[in-house]
Image (spheres, helix red, strand yellow):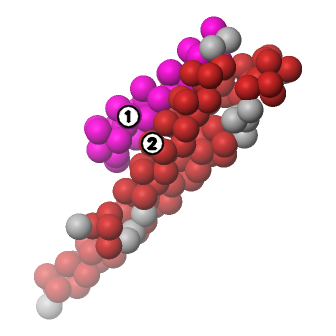
Amino acid sequence: MKSVILSAVFLITLSVFCLFVKTHTVERVDTLYRLTESLPTDLTRYESAPERYRSTADAIGDDWSDAVGYFSYVCGYNALNRADEAVWNLYAALESGDYPSAIAARYQLLDALRRMRELETVSLSSIF
């Protein structure tokens, strides 16, 4: 009977830990997603206020740098590498003033973050 109780306690502890990791990961991805989504898709908006969007790129880069160590433990490397490349492509494009490339990198990053989030949520597609 002791082993059944111990197994139940272990299962509950493991489930709570997994729920915490999932929730924390999704929150971090959502924060990055909202920052990235705030960037425009219109070239003239970039040209009218480049400093504003450079500061957003700095915030995305800082948040990504803080989160990437954690993500490396909980996300697959394919998704992680894809998002990492998109973050730094977006950052470099905004810093250099290459706004068409920034728009493309924005879409790549949004897609990469959407996929990371999908893999971390509990659904049949993330299990199978």
Report if residue 87 is visible in the image: yes
Residue 56 sits in quarter: top right
User: Label 2's element?
Assistant: helix
Tell me if residue 1 comes above or below residue 125 in the rendering.
below
Identify which residue is drawn at 57% across, 21% down.
Answer: 101
Report if residue 63 is visible in the image: no
Instruction: Mark 1 and mark 2 in contact? Answer it, CB < 8 Å.
Output: yes
Amino acid type for the residue under numbered disc 2: Ala
Task: Report the residue marked by disc 1.
Answer: 82
Task: Label the magenta part by its dominant secondary structure.
Answer: helix
In the picture, measured across the screen, residue 45 lies left or right of residue 116, that is right
The single residue placed furthest to the top in the displayed view is 96
Q: Which residues are magenta?
A: 67-96
Counting residues from the N terminus, which is met first, the one under dot 1 or under dot 2? 1
- Does 71 lie within the magenta span? yes
Location of the N terminus by quadrant is: bottom left
Tell me if residue 89 comes above or below residue 72 in the rendering.
above
Location of the C terminus by quadrant is: bottom left
Identify which residue is drawn at 74% across, 32% down.
Answer: 42
Q: Residue 31 appears at what percent x and percent y?
A: 62, 45
Please tell me the numbered disc located at residue 68: none
Task: Report the residue marked by disc 2.
Answer: 112
The span from disc 1 to disc 2 (Cα, nearest Å) is 6 Å
User: Label 1's element?
Assistant: helix
